Image: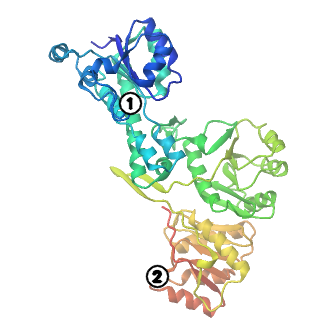
Amino acid sequence: MASKKIKSALISVYHKDGLEPIVRELQRLGVRIYSTGGTQRFIEGLGAEVEAVEQLTSYPSILDGRVKTLHPKVFGGLLARREAGHLAQLEQYDIPEIDLAIVDLYPFEETLAGTDDEAEIIEKIDIGGIALIRGAAKNFNDVAVVPSKAEYGLLLRLLQEQDGVTSLADRRELARRAFLVSSHYDTAIFHYFNGDRAGEAFKQSILESQPLRYGENPHQEGVFYGRLEDMFEKTGGKELSYNNLMDIDAAVGLMREFKDAAPTFAILKHTNSCGVATRPTILEAWEGALAGDNVSAFGGILISNAAIDLATAQAIDQIFYEVLIAPAFEADALEFLSKKKKRILLRIKGWHANRRSFRSLLNGVIGQDTDLKAETAEELKTATRRAPTPEEAEDLLFANICAKHLKSNTIVLAKGRQLIGMGCGQTSRVDALKQAILKARSFGFALEGAVMASDAFFPFPDCVEIAHEAGITAVIQPGGSIKDQESIDYCDQHGMAMALTGVRHFKH
């Protein structure tokens, strides 16, 4: 029978908030309630009738509460199919049917985030609770399961509007949610034992999902798994789209590299930066970033490493943009920017970085360590007779960061801590350089004294030749080609400086 009337319920929860109205409804409907420990005392405190699981099993809670519900009289009532053979066995062994299981889990992730005490963390690995949830969910044809307080609202509607009668679709949906809860919980525990702290490697929790307007294109559905509110405070604006989130992720990844630097602004389109500048003030940084490519900036994602003041807000307001991200907005700037209701303003709470990255492809998923390597001046190895000047070295490190966050193959041209030209996503490094030079010149930049960064080594000296002819005086690259010396020799012959990082930053 598809519809089932709830006549009995097992309630065993860690969090009691939100439970009272459910108990009241169960009491109204005459549902027989079984419970354990603190939950039992809570229900008794409401004046509702409840039978202790200990009475049902004839066993007390033992081993400091580690074993309370792990008993055939509990699991038999949950797992029995409501058919002749199973019902006969329930009668034979005096096992009651259990139609509803309300169970949540020990707060493993919350405990992990608040302590390093392994004994305390291990005690928050739920055994009985996860087994009850899975058992009830497996038997969804006959049993309804409520695996967390997030489902209390749904259960309350079923009790109030349907008088405790559940359809097969209701129970199947609750089972789906139950396995979502259990898979998330087990994954968090795995990452703890795998050495990932505080859920860091699995922050994009499958437990928290948010439907998007659509995917990359309107004909594709989209969803975000994770907790955006942990990273951002959203002030007004329309809902974030799939493409917005892709660009925001790229923007945060880039600006994380500059979080401790002087005021820096970046503009991104399709996950690639088209403007980046570091300046004494955030207004000057905005003006420098916009000058890098004021055409591509239209409809872009904007990000700053410093608070947005009113003067900067008014300057930004001259162009159309999708999202503006900053660690803070001064009160008058926020008031001004909020006048345009569709613009998305995000206050970033912290520069979080997932230590592992994943991507679906073919018939599976690939994962890797996130590229969090950031080169320092001390790590650079001068390969040429002439070392970079202090100004060149500063620009080389700046350009190297920009190159790291652009699609391969990429070349970045920088001058005065400003991105003045870039070529990215090219199949040839020479094409990437030519694109960067053309772009720089089209926006009026003089290349004399500029520097060049490459995300990978130069297999031939052609790029340094082209760069020299354009007026570029210093180069940064990983090195590692068997023909490195050819590029180094060319630089020596023409007074150029070259620094090697020893680290490749491909981005596919």
Please give the residue where the numbered disc 2 appears in the rendered image. 481
Q: What residue type is labelled 1?
A: Ala
The answer to whether residue 143 is visible is no
User: Which residue shows up at 61% across the image and 67% down it?
Assistant: 401
Is 52 on the left-hand or right-hand side of 323? left
Q: 123 and 384: which one is in front?
A: 123
In the picture shown, does residue 211 fall above or below 461? Answer: above
Residue 178: which disc?
A: 1
Quadrant of residue 87 in the image?
A: top left
Is 30 on the left-hand or right-hand side of 315? left
**The residue tagged with tag 2: helix, strand or loop?**
loop
Q: How crowded is mark 1: few (under 14 residues within 10 Å), some or many (20 or more)?
A: many
Mark 1 or 2, nearer chain start: 1
Q: Which amino acid does label 2 sit on?
A: Ser
- How far from the left and from the top, in percent, is residue 83? 19, 15
Quadrant of residue 3 in the image?
A: top left
- How far from the left and from the top, in percent, is residue 58? 27, 21
